[in-house]
Structure formats: C-alpha cells, structure tokens
Image (cartoon, helix red, strand yellow):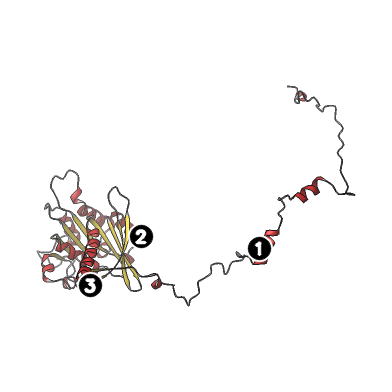
Amino acid sequence: MTPSEGARAGTGRELEMLDSLLALGGLVLLRDSVEWEGRSLLKALVKKSALCGEQVHILGCEVSEEEFREGFDSDINNRLVYHDFFRDPLNWSKTEEAFPGGPLGALRAMCKRTDPVPVTIALDSLSWLLLRLPCTTLCQALHAVSHQDSCPGDSSSVGKVSVLGLLHEELHGPGPMGALSNLAQTEVTLGGTMGQASAHILCRRPRQCPTDQTQWFSILPDFSLDLQEGPSVESQPYSDPHIPPVDPTTHLTFNLHLSKKEREARDSLILPFQFSSEKQQALLRPRPGQATSHIFYEPDAYDDLDQEDPDDDLDI
C-alpha cells in the first residue's frame, strides 16, 4: 500500500467513526473528564457536519467565540452559525442578535423550524446549562429539539437533527447523569491509557439491542481524526515483569494448597462411610472370643401375631 493509499484508508476509517456518531441523529452525549477533554472531539464533529452541508448552530456558553473558532479554516467558520452566550449569558446588554430567553430560548426557537435541511446543534457545554437550569426543564427542551423530525401528526418534512452535548461528568451527580444518559441516542465516553485517547461509543437504535465499540484515536491540529490501533498488551498497566503478581491467598486463615505428603495422606484416608471388604467381614463375622449379643422376645397378650391381618389389634 502506498502512502497515498494509506492516507485514503485512514480518512475512510475516520469518516466511518464520525458517521456512526452522527447517523442516528438525536442527542449525542460527549462525556469527558479533567484528564481527557472532549471539546476537540466536539469540534471534529462540527467540522464533519459543516463539510456535509448541514446547518450547524453553536451555542457557546463555556468559552469565547474566538477560542471555539480557533483551528478552523475560513471555509468552515463561514458555515457556522454561532450564538454567543459567553460574554452576556443573561442578555443584560439587550442586544438584538441575542435570544431573549438565553440558551434555553435558543433551543426552543430551533424547535419551530420547518426546513428540510439537516441541522447539527453543538452545546458547549451541556454542563454549563445543567448547572444553571433545572434538569427536567433542560431534558424537556433537548427531547423536543432532538425528536422534532419524528413528531407524530407533523406533515412537514423536517430534516434530521443532531444535538451534540459536551458533558463534564465529574461535575454532576448520578441523577442528572442518568437522566441525560437515558435521553441520548449515542453516548461517547472519553478515556484512554498510556497517553492514548479512546472513545467508548454506545449506540441505541430504535427496536434494536444497544451496540458498543471502542475506538482509539488522536485529533490533528485541523480537527481531523487519526484512528489508531489499541495499545498492545505489554503497554497495559501492571504488566511490569519486575513486580511480582499479588497472591490473593496470602493472608487467608486456611490453606488452599496441599503439599505432596498432605495429598498422599488425603488419598490414603478411608472415610467412615466407605465400607471396604475387610470392614464388612469384620462387622458380619465376629472374631473368636468376642462377646456376642442375643435378643430374647416374649410376646404380650396384646401382641398381634396374625400375619394374615396385621391390623387386627386396631379394632377397626
């Protein structure tokens, strides 16, 4: 394979991963942490959507517009519709371009669209909204905007909607995390080992079993993905040959292992319920000089000795 063919193959694998994240539409949850940030993957998905000709709306709350647009070329930046809630999240300046209801008002306004063009809405970040809005209100707005293309009774053809939500999972408790997880069609949990990033992708398709996969990747300066092979077994943690493995039976109060002599003694032991031929003969035939026992029986007057009718004494 030539270098150019390898580059095309890598690009195909990259598009396959990005397409799998955006194919289902609905809410795509990007769960990152302090160690593994997810804004770069969010921007990679935004770039992919813009190159596919979709309308891309950015609700920027956590970083400035200049910081978010940094790294995109002019062609990508011209295709992005940026809603800046970073400088004035509550619209105190009363500017005309700002939504009066803030980010939640922007989400609700996007529910009223009727054009058939696919739309991608990037929330940077969903954690910023979750810390300032009630969880139920935010979930209702996300459900309305991510399912507007499948509303029953709607005769208008509305394009597919994908909502990309960046979520810092260390900032929230299990309640909000569980609610958003149940609402999402796709969950991407970022992690990694030995300095190599990974994405665990969980997809929930309607009337199908959930599927999950793990992709190892790195993000290039132009926000393209470089898919990589997973780390080898030798590079996994706790594989240092100089560190002896921990024996879980070290501090037990009983011994799970037998020595050779103990094993031989166990095999030669005759258990009480095991009757050998010698033991049977000893029980059935008393030895010479051994005291024997006799049973003397004298029947009573009421004893029933009639074998024809054993129940004769019952007076039935």
Where is residue 193 shown, x and y percent of the image? 36, 71
For the residues bearing labels 3 and 1, Cβ distance under 8 angstroms: no
Left or right side of 144 for 189: right
Q: Residue 64's quadrant in the figure?
A: bottom left
From the top left corner, tell me how far across and down residue 17 is, in percent.
25, 62
Kind of residue sitting beneath label 1: Arg
Which of pointers 1 and 2 indicates the residue nearer the eye? Answer: 1
Residue to which mark 1 is pinned = 263
Nearer mark to the viewer, of 2 and 3: 3
Q: Is residue 251 left or right of residue 70?
A: right
**Earlier along the polypeptide chain: callout 2 or callout 3?**
2
Kindly identify the amino acid type of the residue bearing the numbered disc 2: Pro
Q: Which residue is mark 2?
A: 174
Residue at which label 3 appears: 220
Amino acid residing under circle 3: Leu
The front one of 116 and 285 is: 285
Q: Nearer the viewer, mark 3 or mark 1?
A: 1
Say what secondary structure mark 1 lies in: helix
* Residue at the limit of the structure toward the bottom, as seen here: 242
